[in-house]
Image: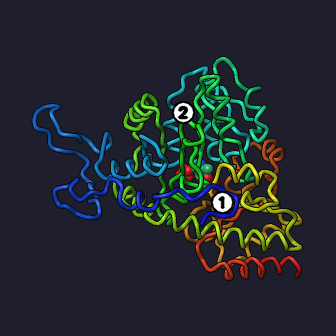
Amino acid sequence: MAQDGFLPYPKGFATAAIHHAHDPENWNSMAVIPPIVTSTTFKQNGPAEYEKYDYSRSGNPTRDVLQAVLAKLDNAKYALAFSSGLGATTALLGMLSSGDHIVIGDDIYGGTNRLLNQVMARFNIKMTFTDLTDISNLEKSIEPNTKLVWLESPTNPTMKVVDIKAAAAIAKRHNILLVVDNTFLTPYLQRPLDLGADLTIYSISKYMNGHGDVIMGSIATNNEEIYQKLKFLQNAMGIIPAPFDCYQVNRGLKTLALRMQKHNENCRLVGEFLERHSKVEKVLHPGLPSHPQYELFKKQASGHSGTFSMYLKGGLEESRTFLKAVKVFTLAESLGGYESLIELPSLMTHASVPSDLRKQLGISDSLIRLSVGLEDPEDLIADLDQALKKLEE
Ligand SMILES: C=C(NCc1c(COP(=O)(O)O)cnc(C)c1O)C(=O)O
C-alpha cells in the first residue's frame, strides 16, 4: 500500500518492468533474458540494404529493449537512453538554437547548472533561473524566445516541490516544452508525463539502475516530433550507453518497485529520527508533514524516495566532524543506490553552483544531503546517532 494520503502505487508497474518487451520469440535463441548484443556493426544484404541495425551508435538490440521498458514505465510512447544524465541533458539542449531562452528552476543538480552556465551560455542560449515553488515566477520569466521550461521536483539538494500540473498548464498556454528531471523519484513514485510534462529526464545512474555501478541517462516523451529530433541527436552527437550497461540497467529495473517502497520506508524512519535530534536544526523531507509543500507533494507523488537533506547545527567544522564519523553511511557523491550515501553539497555536488546562488538557495556548509539505502533502518539510525554524538565531544 502507498503511504496515507499519497497517490496509489501504479498498478502493473512491477509486471511491466519484468515482462514488457521481453518475449523470447523476439530473438532466434528464444532466451528468456534478452541477450546482450555487443557487436558494433551488422552485416548488410547489399549497400545500405539492412534489416534494422547497421551500426551500434545508431541502434542496438540491447539498448532497444531497455528503451522500450523505460517508455512503458513512464506511460510514454518513446524513450531514449544516453551515456549519462548530463549526456541526456546535452542531447535535449541540443534541440535549441542560438538566441533561444529557457526558464529553469533555481535549485537543480550542480552539474546541470554547470552545463548550462559554463557550456550552453557560450552558444548564446539565454536562461532565467527562478524559484518555481512560486509558480507565478514562471509566467513572469517567459519571453518571446522561450523554448523550454526545466525543473526538478523535489529539487536537488534543498528538496523544494514544484506544482508540475500548474507548470505544465502555463507552458502549454505559451506553446513551450516542459521538461521535468524525475531522477529523485523515478516513474514508480511520480509520473511527470501523466501530470502534463512534455518530457521527463533521468540520471539512470541513480534509483533507476539502483546498484551504483552504471552511469547513464534517459528521456521519455509522447511527442513523436521531439522523439525523432532526440533520436537524431542521440546518434549525431554520439551520446549513447554501452550494451552491457543497458543490460545492467534493464536488470536493475526489475526490482525498482520493491526498492522504491523500501527506500520510502527507510527514509521516513531516518527523517523522523533526525527531526527529533537536538543537533539537527531542520529536516527537508517532502514525505514528512513538516515539509512546507507536503500537501502538494501528496497530490503528485505516490511517496518519497530515499534522498533528503537536513541542516546540522553549527558550521563547516561540525559538518566535517559528523561526516567523517559515519560508518554505515558512506561519504560520497551520488544517490539512489542500495548503499546509503551522505554528502555536503556546498563543497561536493553543488560546488560549481555560483556562490551567490548557493547562498540564496540555502546551500550552506551546514546543509547535508542523505541518500538512505536498503540497509536495516536500525543500523542506519544507530550510525547517525553515534556520528552525531561526536559533536558533543
Ligand atoms: C551525481 C549527482 N547527481 C546527478 C544528477 C544528474 C546528472 O546525472 P549523471 O548520470 O551523473 O550525468 C542529473 N539530474 C539530477 C537530478 C542529478 O542528481 C548527485 O547529485 O550526487
Question: What residue does disc 2 label?
Answer: 93
Give the x, y percent position of residue 199.
53, 38
- Residue positioned 70% across, 58% down in the render: 5
- Residue positioned 40% across, 52% down in the render: 69
Kind of residue at badge 2 = Leu
Give the x, y percent position of residue 346.
75, 54
Q: Is residue 242 left or right of residue 148?
A: left
Measured Cα–Cα span from mark 1 to mark 2: 28 Å
Q: Is residue 180 left or right of residue 277?
A: left
Residue occupying the far left of the picture: 46
Residue 270 vs 162, above or below: the answer is below
- Give the number of the disc on residue 304: 1
Q: Nearer the viewer, residue 264 or 376?
A: 264
Residue 117 is drawn in which quadrant? top right
Residue 333 vs 176, above or below: the answer is below
Mark nearer the viewer, 1 or 2: 1
Q: Nearer the viewer, residue 219 or 301?
A: 301
Label 1 packing within 10 angstroms: few (<14), some (14-19), many (20+):
many
Kind of residue at badge 1 = His
Q: Nearer the viewer, residue 303 or 88?
A: 303
The reply to whether the residue tagged 1 has its Cβ within 8 angstroms of ligand 1 is: no
Residue 180 is drawn in which quadrant? top right
Label 2 packing within 10 angstroms: few (<14), some (14-19), many (20+):
some
Where does the N terminus fall, quadrant-wise? Answer: bottom right
Give the x, y percent position of residue 40.
26, 48
- Residue positioned 72% across, 56% down in the render: 345
